[in-house]
Amino acid sequence: MTASEPRWRRLDPDDRRQAILESAIAAFGKQSYAAVQMAEVARDAGVARGLLNHYFGTKRDLYLAVVREMMIVPELENVRLPTGDLDARIAASVDWLMLVLGRHGATWLAVGADGVGDDEEIRAILDEADDRAAQRALDAIGFEGKGARHEAAMAAIRAFGGLVRAAAREWLYREALSDKQVRVLLTETLVRIAEMVMADEM
């Protein structure tokens, strides 16, 4: 087998789809949308080229699937929320976030943090992702406010998301911050935001 030939693997349908998605995540993290070749994604996933169309449709459909996979947090029923006092819960939440950024930060930034122009489909996915992530963070800290208080808390967490994206760029692209510095920055900021929303200071 040469380096250009696919590494064929026998997988069940779910595993095959996931292998394609993981290959695409890596590809879109390393290259621009235009530069990504579907044949290369298939080869790296170890599947036939036609299976990409079977599972995902077009290149754009595959890209949208990557955006959703990278940006939208898991459903809460599939997630074990952190326990302990407020500081412990926030530390656990930031640990999870740093793990995600460490594994797929380049793709996360490429598909979600570097602008989407006038692409309404991607903007809709990112808006949904922001809302889910904000609600996940509020659930993690045990916030139960309703109405206007809930909306203000959601807005504060969404604003925190902007800091996450900027910090990730400084860490992963510019290398101006270390992972330890990013962890401290995010943790201390989120602690203060959490204290404000829990005390209804927003």
Image (cartoon, rainbow, N blue to C red):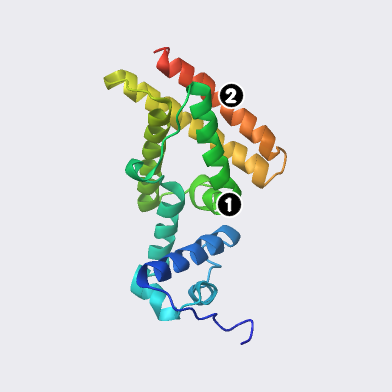
Q: Tell me the SS state at disc 1.
A: helix
Would residue 73 appear left or right of 147 to someone viewing this image? right
Q: Amino acid at mark 1?
A: Arg
Q: Position of residue 4 (x, y in %)?
A: 61, 82
Residue type marked 2:
Glu
Q: Which mark is residue 188?
A: 2
| Residue at the spot of label 1 | 103
| Residue occupying the point 55% across, 80% down | 7
- Residue 57 visible? The answer is no
Please say if 19 is above or below 180: below
Residue 103 rendering spot, x and y as whole percentages? 58, 52
Q: Within 10 angstroms of label 2, few (less than 14), some, or many (20 or more) residues?
A: some
Decide which of tag 2 and tag 1 comes sooner along the chain.
1
Q: Is residue 184 left or right of residue 77?
A: right
Q: Residue at x 46, y 68 (%)?
A: 20
Closest to the observer, 76 or 197: 76
The one of 116 and 143 positioned closer to us in this rendering: 143
Question: Which residue does the image show at 53% across and 23% down from the upper left?
Answer: 87
Quadrant where the N terminus sits is bottom right
| Residue in view at x 46 percent, y 16 percent | 196
| Residue 124 x, y percent position in the rendering | 35, 46
Q: Decide: few, some or many residues near mark 1? Use Cα within 10 Å; few <14, some 14-19, many ≥20.
A: few
Q: What residue occupies the far front of the structure in this picture?
A: 84
Q: CA distance from mark 2 to mark 1?
A: 23 Å
Q: Do residues under tags 2 and 1 come within 8 Å of each other at their CB atoms?
A: no
**Up/down of 96 relative to 142, above or below:** below
Q: Is residue 185 shown to the viewer in this render?
A: yes
Q: Quadrant of the C terminus?
A: top left
Residue 2 image position (x, y, % from top left): 63, 86
